[in-house]
Image (cartoon, rainbow, N blue to C red):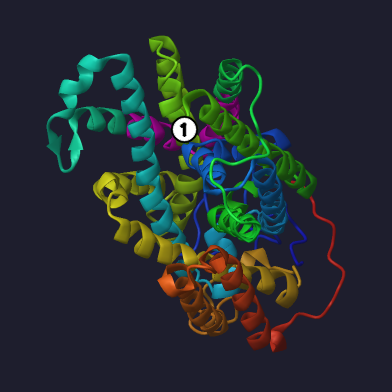
């Protein structure tokens, strides 16, 4: 890699001058590398500890897998994600730039807006939906604690009742205040909210164990299915967990760019992914299995389970904790990316903070409660866009590791001159676009067409693999000569 002088503001030297259309303080290589392994570990706790992942793990139990099968499948899945995150994390840490600038390496200085805007649209939509889902959990627990609030649910405006508006806007404003202060504020917030949910989860697991007289069967499932179906579900769970985390795998460099060295990135990922993430899933399954024994049915919503404690203080604490946890995953997975992605579109006017505020405003204006209640939007629009992320990841990985062989001239990523190696053809790499379009179409077809439902869980993996292979073929003549790569330096 040609990043040999990290002391310069753009990675190798202070010449040539960056094009103002391509840079601002937030897109330039990180000058402050103060993220520790714990910060990345806490980031993963923030991303994993949420209602969606709890419900996903608990749902596998209801579908017919037992606790140990779920544990083993998710362990394999998170181990694969760990490898992918390390690969993308290395790029972010070595170059010091966020995802949209990394995309310039493969797609060109202007073509990078294609992957950046695809990622931004998905993140903004899910930012709103996740905020709404957190507000629903708060509503349920508030209504259980204070039934008199039911009168606030009788009338609605644009599809949401008064109590729902209060809960949603409260969470929306708190998140906006956190993210408006920049990435350092994000780091401090996730350091707190990441571990917070573990306190509630451990307490919930202890409570359900006491109610179940300390005996919860983990080798059985409430649904009886054949061995062949269990095997299919086992592999399907791996595929789905890869697709779920494929979004953040694409832009993990947004976080690893602040790490002082690659060892820090690997350590944070190790404790946060195969260790913590699998443990959280296992506790979720144990609690769900316990609910079957205690209440006679599987309760896959932790908010509903906390409500059965019938103690106002417990329910309020539970509501606040799950709200904090959801805000944590929202900020990590759905805010940071569009903030950088929008800044990349117009760096002279849009900073990270401005991009973040645009994202939060857009997440409100799309009325996410209406989006979530419309299966067509969630399954076909967001699902179709999500299927595009695998091919993007495959192209970027092959281009960096096998075509460019890790040697990147970071300064040239901020130049729009025809002699820049990342200018390609009018600022766009036609080979990357040519590999992306057909493989994205294949991935989206597999994910959305009912006839391919059996392979739908593997659409991200198939899209990644086909795009990587196709790009390797079309770009094989562009491969850099093999040379030893210099050791990374911390700045």
Would residue 176 be counted in the magenta stretch? yes
Q: Is residue 459 left or right of residue 370?
A: right
Q: Which residue is located at x 50 percent, y 37 percent?
A: 50
Decide whether the magenta segment is chiefly helix, strand or loop: helix
State the residue position of label 1: 297
From what the image shows, is residue 20 above or below residue 245?
A: below
Q: Quadrant of residue 157?
A: top left
From what the image shows, is residue 395 above or below residue 305?
A: below
From what the image shows, is residue 130 above or below residue 107?
A: above
Circle 1 packing at 10 Å, graded few (<14), some (14-19), many (20+), is some
The answer to whether residue 342 is seen in the rendering is no
Magenta-tinted stretch = 170-198
| Nearer to the camera, 393 or 442 | 442
Q: Quadrant of residue 404?
A: bottom right
Q: Which residue is located at x 36 percent, y 22 percent?
A: 141
Q: Which residue is located at x 57 percent, y 33 percent?
A: 289
From what the image shows, is residue 73 above or below residue 311?
A: below
Helix, strand or loop status at disc 1: loop
Percent x, y of residue 445: 45, 75
Looking at the rendering, in which quadrant would you find the N terminus?
bottom right
Q: Is residue 89 left or right of residue 362?
A: right
């Amino acid at each position: 890699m040609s990043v040999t002088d990290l002391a310069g503001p753009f990675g190798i030297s202070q010449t040539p001058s960056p094009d103002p259309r391509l840079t601002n303080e937030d897109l330039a290589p990180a000058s402050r590398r103060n993220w520790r392994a714990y910060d990345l570990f806490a980031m993963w706790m923030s991303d994993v500890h949420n209602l969606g992942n709890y419900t996903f793990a608990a749902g596998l139990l209801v579908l017919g897998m037992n606790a140990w099968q779920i544990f083993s499948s998710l362990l394999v899945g998170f181990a694969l994600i760990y490898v992918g995150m390390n690969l993308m994390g290395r790029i972010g840490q070595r170059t010091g730039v966020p995802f949209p600038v990394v995309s310039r390496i493969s797609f060109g200085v202007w073509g990078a807006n294609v992957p950046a805007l695809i990622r931004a649209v998905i993140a903004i939509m899910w930012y709103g939906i996740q905020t709404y889902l957190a507000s629903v959990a708060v509503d349920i627990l508030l209504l259980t604690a204070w039934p008199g609030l039911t009168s606030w649910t009788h009338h609605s405006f644009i599809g949401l009742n008064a109590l729902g508006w209060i809960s949603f806007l409260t969470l929306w404003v708190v998140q906006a205040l956190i993210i408006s202060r920049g990435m350092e504020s994000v780091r401090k917030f996730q350091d707190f909210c990441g571990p917070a949910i573990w306190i509630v989860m451990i307490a919930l697991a202890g409570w359900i164990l006491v109610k179940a007289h300390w005996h919860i069967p983990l080798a059985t499932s409430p649904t009886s299915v054949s061995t062949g179906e269990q095997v299919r579900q086992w592999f399907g769970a791996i595929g789905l967990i890869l697709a779920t985390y494929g979004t953040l795998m694409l832009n993990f460099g947004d976080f690893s760019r602040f790490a002082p060295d690659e060892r820090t990135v690997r350590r944070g990922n190790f404790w946060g992914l195969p260790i913590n993430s699998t443990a959280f899933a296992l506790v979720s399954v144990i609690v769900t299995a316990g609910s079957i024994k205690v209440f006679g049915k599987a309760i896959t919503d932790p908010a509903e389970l906390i409500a059965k404690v019938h103690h106002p203080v417990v329910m309020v604490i539970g509501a606040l904790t799950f709200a904090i946890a959801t805000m944590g995953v929202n900020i990590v997975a759905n805010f940071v990316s569009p903030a950088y992605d929008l800044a990349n579109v117009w760096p002279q006017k849009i900073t990270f903070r401005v991009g973040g505020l645009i994202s939060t405003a857009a997440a409100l204006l799309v009325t996410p409660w209406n989006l979530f209640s419309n299966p067509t939007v969630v399954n076909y629009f967001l699902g179709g866009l999500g299927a595009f992320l695998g091919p993007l990841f495959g192209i970027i990985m092959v281009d960096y590791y096998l075509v460019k062989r890790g040697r990147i001239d970071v300064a040239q990523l901020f130049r729009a001159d025809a002699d820049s190696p990342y200018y390609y053809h009018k600022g766009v790499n036609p080979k990357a676009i040519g590999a992306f379009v057909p493989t994205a179409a294949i991935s989206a077809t597999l994910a959305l067409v009912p006839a391919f439902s059996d392979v739908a869980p593997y659409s991200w993996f198939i899209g990644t693999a086909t795009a990587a292979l196709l790009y390797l073929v079309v770009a094989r003549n562009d491969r850099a000569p093999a040379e030893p790569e210099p050791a990374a330096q911390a700045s």
